[in-house]
Amino acid sequence: MSNAHLGSLVLALAALLASGCGKRACFHWTELEGACPSSEEALVFFENPGCLSEIDSIDGEGDFDGELCCYDVTTVDTGDEECVPAQMPVPGGGGVGGVPRPR
């Protein structure tokens, strides 16, 4: 999994947790990457290997604001609050890893 994807995952989770009534989830995207991925393609950006996803469905196409692709989502309570990305060293620099902590 790439550092950019892991950084996007952290941003997506933070955006999801910070959202209120109308649930939105976002991940980092650039204009160079083109239009936001379709709702089907975007689901992978919200996955955390080894953890259950709180996103049950992506309910529409993404909106690009110049830095983020954001989607309306339906969420579910997975009961998996302890599963969070762990920080891991990245060769050549720092970064965020996607390995869940053992229970």
Image (spheres, rainbow, N blue to C red):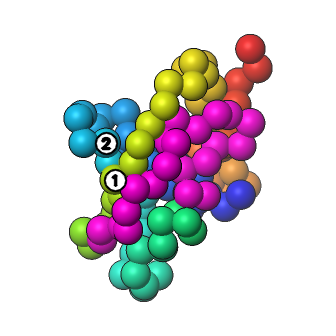
Give the amino acid type for the residue marked by disc 1 in the picture.
Asp
The location of residue 36, given as percent across then percent down, is 41, 74
Numbered marks: total: 2
The location of residue 9, given as percent across then percent down, is 53, 49
Q: Is residue 71 above or below residue 88?
A: below
Q: Please check the rendered image and state whether residue 55 is part of the magenta-colored stretch, yes or no.
A: yes
Q: Are marks 1 and 2 in contact (CB under 8 Å)?
A: yes
Within 10 angstroms of label 2, few (less than 14), some, or many (20 or more) residues?
some
Say whether residue 73 is visible.
Answer: yes
Assign a secondary structure to mark 1. strand
Q: Which mark is residue 20?
A: none
Which of the marked residues, 1 or 2, is nearer the chain's N terminus? 2
Q: Is residue 37 left or right of residue 61?
A: right
Q: Please check the rendered image and state whether residue 84 is part of the magenta-colored stretch, yes or no.
A: no
Q: Is residue 99 left or right of residue 10?
A: right
- Magenta segment boundaries in residue numbering: 43-64
Say whether residue 10 is visible.
Answer: no
Residue at 39% of width from left, 48% of height from top?
73
Q: CA distance from mark 1 to mark 2?
A: 6 Å
Between 94 and 18, the residue placed more toward the observer is 18
Identify the image quadrant of residue 17: top left
- Name the image quarter holding the N terminus: bottom right
The location of residue 89, given as percent across then percent down, is 69, 43
Q: Which residue matches tag 1?
A: 72
Identify the image quadrant of residue 101: top right
Assign a secondary structure to mark 2. loop
Q: Which residue matches tag 2?
A: 23
